[in-house]
Image: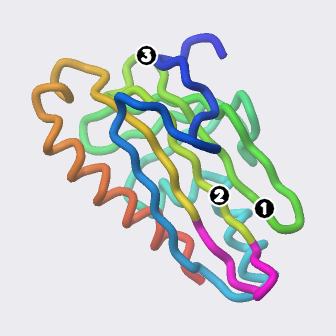
Amino acid sequence: MDGLTYTEVGATAGEMPPGYHHVRARRVVGHDRADFERAADALLAGEAQRRAGARVTLSETPMRSGTRVTMRLWVFRIPCLVVWAERTDTVAGFAYGTLPGHPERGEERFTLTLQPTGEVVFDIAAFSAPGRWFTRVGAPLGRLVQAWMTRRYLRALDS
């Protein structure tokens, strides 16, 4: 996809590429179809990011492949492009990749799954590396911010 600041598009779906910081996190956010549908609607409308504290602008709702996502967190502008989106009876999610101007470079995937047991599981997978001079200098702080935001994303869709 044109404009992305990394080449490993889609790698959050499987084995993540070397040379990046990797994140995998999971949380049960509900317990039945109604919880899944509610969480899926919210996820594909950018609510995980909003509820985590970012200001979010989407080029379209619900998100689909090609949707432009611009987040603002503190003084940072965080532009992304949705590279995968899906909604079925048991899976809903999207992945976005970084665009020029993003503090990092890489990809992040957010997936909800309605398990056969009825549990609604929210998974996050990401790979990233510093994308700007200030994130290279502040890389340890960047990892702390990423971990903090991942925890906030996971709690954002609780039923």
Q: How much space separates mark 2 and mark 3, taking CA atoms?
A: 25 Å
x 51%, y 39%: residue: 16
Which residue occupies the extreme left position in the image? 137
Give whichever of discs 3 and 1 has the lower sequence position: 1
Q: Is residue 111 left or right of residue 27?
A: right
Residue 91 numbered tag: 1
Q: Quadrant of residue 133?
A: top left
Display coloring: rainbow
Q: Quadrant of residue 103?
A: top left
- Mark 2 neighbour class, 10 Å CA radius: few under 14, some 14 to 19, many 20 or more: many
State yes or no: residue 117 in magenta.
yes
Q: Amino acid at mark 2?
A: Thr
Q: Position of residue 74 (x, y in %)?
A: 26, 44
x 63%, y 73%: residue: 121
Residue 100 numbered tag: 3
Q: Amino acid at mark 1?
A: Val
Q: Position of residue 87 (x, y in %)?
A: 82, 55
Which element type, helix, strand or loop, lies under badge 3?
A: loop
Q: Amino acid at mark 3?
A: Pro
Q: Position of residue 120 (x, y in %)?
A: 68, 78
State yes or no: residue 80 in magenta.
no
